[in-house]
Amino acid sequence: DGDSVAQRASAAVRAVAQLVAESIDDQGLVAFWPKSRGYVALTAWSLQFLAEAKKRGEPVDDKLLERLTRALQQSLRSDYPRLLSGSEYLERSMALEALASAGVADQAYLAELAGQAQFMAPEAAARIAVALAQAKQADPQTLARLVAQLWEAVETRSVQGRAVYAGLRAGAWGSPLILPSETRTLATITRAVALADPSEPRLALLTDALIRLGQ
């Protein structure tokens, strides 16, 4: 029943939180397993998950959230030494998105990275757009420019007079250590578009594509 599902969900959240706490390295970054090297991307995913769990009423240790937040705030610097080579923009955008979702977005870095988004791969640009859409003082013009850039990355073809998804104009996906994929990139683009304009008629094109990729 509903109560048992909620209890299992709470138990799963507690288990994940404990594993995250046990897997933080000496730089405050979360690793894939205890006593190994942590990554900015995995730290960002961990903060997003735990912040969302807290919003849903789960008991999450505030000290753990603060520790992850501090590590991600440090990782926003362009000279941060633990960024993966070749995936610097992607990891910084992940950190910024996670901080925004936790309600602690850094406005200065948000403006800086939004201004550099034209040089980013689609997933990184999409994560900047998500963070910007969640910001309290988002610049509508900057967000519109970012979304237009995302649409340029989406290729379509006509099938019986209807536009359907035909892939992404993506360059390097990023380091395999942070598990990049076409599906994740498209999902992030879809989220960015939906946050920027929920009434966008082309959203159906993206969601249909995600369903097909999921099959």
Image (cartoon, rainbow, N blue to C red):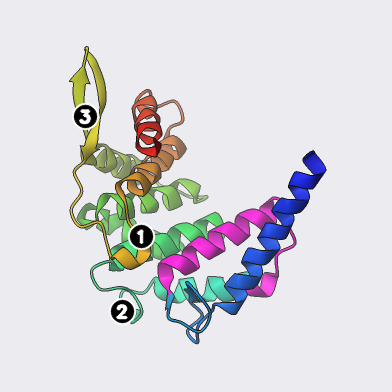
Q: Residue at x 25, y 42 (%)?
A: 149
- Stretch in magenta: 39-64
Q: Name the N-terminal-most of marks 1 and 3.
A: 3
Query: As displayed, is residue 212 above or below residue 94?
Result: above
In the visual, does 166 lie left or right of 194? left
Residue nearest the observer in this picture, 7 or 88: 7
Query: As displayed, is residue 79 above or below residue 90?
Result: below
What is the three-letter code of the residue carrying label 2?
A: Asp
Neighbours of disc 3 within 10 Å: few (<14), some (14-19), many (20+): some
User: How many numbered dots are placed on residues in this image?
Assistant: 3
| Marks 2 and 1, how far apart at CA | 23 Å
Q: Is residue 23 visible?
A: yes
**Magenta stretch: dominant secondary structure:** helix
What label does residue 79 carry, if any? 2
What is the three-letter code of the residue carrying label 1?
A: Leu
Q: Mark 1 points at which residue?
A: 179
Query: As displayed, is residue 84 above or below residue 148?
Result: below
Q: Which residue is drawn at 32% across and 51% down?
A: 181
What label does residue 156 carry, if any? 3
Q: Name the N-terminal-most of marks 2 and 3.
A: 2
Q: Can residue 66 be seen in this view?
A: no
Q: Residue furthest top?
A: 160
